[in-house]
Amino acid sequence: MIDLRRFALGVGVIALGLWSLVSQAAAPPSYIPDGPNVPAITLNEGPSGAAGLAPLPVPPPKGWDQQSIWNMQVVGFQDNQGRASSDDGWIENQNGRYIAYMADSPGKALNPLTGKIEDNGTSLIDVTDVAHPRFLSHIPAPSGSGATHLAVCGGNTLPHAEKNHWYLLRHDGMTNQEIWDVTDPVAPKRLTVIIGGLNMTHHDWWECDTGIAYTVSQTPTDGWQESGSAQHMYIYDLSDPAKPVFIRQFGLVGQQPDAPVKTAQSCTNAPGPSCYEGVTNPPGGIHQIYSAGVNKNRVYLAYGVDFDGVLQILDRQKLLDGCKVPTASPQCATRPTQADLLYPQISYIATNPNQGGHTAVPIFGVPIPEEQQNYLDGKPQRWDLLGVTSEETTNDCLKQAWKNPFLLDITDERTPWPIAVLDVGQFPGDFCAKGSRFGVHELNRQIYAPFYGRLVIVAMFNAGLQVWDIRDPYNPRRVAYFIQAPNKNTHESCGPYRGNPHYCRKAIFSDLGEVDDRGYIYNFDRAGSGLTILKLTGAAAQVVTGEKHDQR
């Protein structure tokens, strides 16, 4: 995918102006999910580094129908045929050609490339020249329910795949999980269906260096029991994408087949053979997965989406091998017992009932600036963090509690603990009156050394992309934002607001802010407003380049 990752690991933080295109073929990739490593985060500047930096004066956004931008610059735009994006997007360097993969929400649109009205699915856009993105192809989802989540791996990284090929893992609505060969992004070809006959799907995660794929799936007959939807994890070996090998199913204690859901008690109060983890048995099952790969040997799971959430840390190897150990039950792979599910668990933390588990993204080895002069074993202190989000799921601000991302300290992973909230308020901006949803959704998940451990990009629905400086994770500060203006393709959203049950506006809906190795940030809009490509400027760029005096 990118040997810049390996280069950055050796030299530390790189100035934005020096980032360059590098071919996948030049050197093997290194960072998660392409390899087992994470970037080494450089120490903050000076004896106290970024500690105690004053919050920046955040300019108020403009009106709901105008673009608002601060410490960022728009460098490119593609309308995505007016299709609404969804939870996932991925930017892949395919031998020096950058392809943006957009997972689309349910709906239909005209594809001028084929002259046909097509069910929304997956859009492939060439973003090599960011000033002139080019729509290459669209893979419809015949189910009519979109293809809302995806992952991409290269054949030069997958252990048993065809070299110089690229592969897309996605689901067609809630019906199946499938692999496409996207080596020629103008003409994708479906390679195989991993599993069909599903009635629930969600986020997938694919370790490209091992081929292990963690898919969120559910069949009508597999027996998993959750309040609401029953999605859990099906794990496969996709090291040869043409020949999927099933490994096991997995989910949260209390949601396994045969668990007495209605009579079960909290494991905290009754740690017997029939208990659940959380304030209640979390509704919705697994929402998102993040594997930290072979070296870190951890998998992070978020359950519950928008309320009654649980965030869980697993031993990756025990998860993969748990059905092979002598203590495993005979049907561990498909109908695991409570003991089977507890075997790989390291810890979990339950959210308060007003928050859920949508996203959990680990950030390893963050230098805590207040502690740089305090040494442990001869080395400055570095802590591990978990960036987590709930999800705002309604247009009505009065119906849900405030939803903002927050940071957990997982340095001692047995006891995760929240340390900071990345707060974006309703005012200024009057976001509750803007239309669409206001609240958090997603964090960027692709790893590139100049951003890693310094910035997180948060998608806040109608509040756009919000960029946070986390070099001092106990005192994060907002350093940039981009709030797109509605355009001709923006869908109207309606919902109750201040006594008006049919309050409607064409409001933007930033679903995800993802990054690439060149330093560009991609805003995926779920209201059909297109793909906007941005770069950092001002104080936000200074955080990346390592300059100390951030004033604007």
Image (spheres, rainbow, N blue to C red):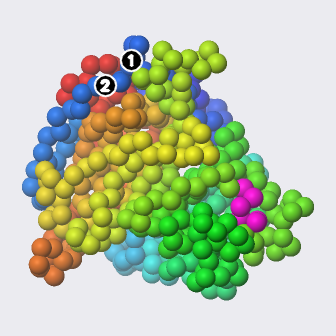
Residue 52's tag is 2
Which residue sits at x=18%, y=39%? 58
Q: Relative to residue 258, is residue 191 depicted above or below?
A: above
Rendering quarter of residue 168:
bottom right
Image: magenta residue range: 339-344
Residue 48's tag is 1
Which residue sits at x=75%, y=76%? 335
Which residue sits at x=18%, y=68%? 435
* Most frequent secondary structure within the magenta stretch: helix
User: Farthest front residue?
Assistant: 269
State the quadrant of the C terminus: top left
User: Farthest right residue?
Assistant: 326
Local SS, label 2:
loop
Image spot of residue 143 (x, y percent): 50, 82
Q: Are marks 1 and 2 in contact (CB under 8 Å)?
A: yes
Q: Nearer the viewer, residue 18 or 412?
A: 412
Position of residue 264 in the picture relative to residue 236 (left or right) = left
Image spot of residue 547 (x, y percent): 33, 19
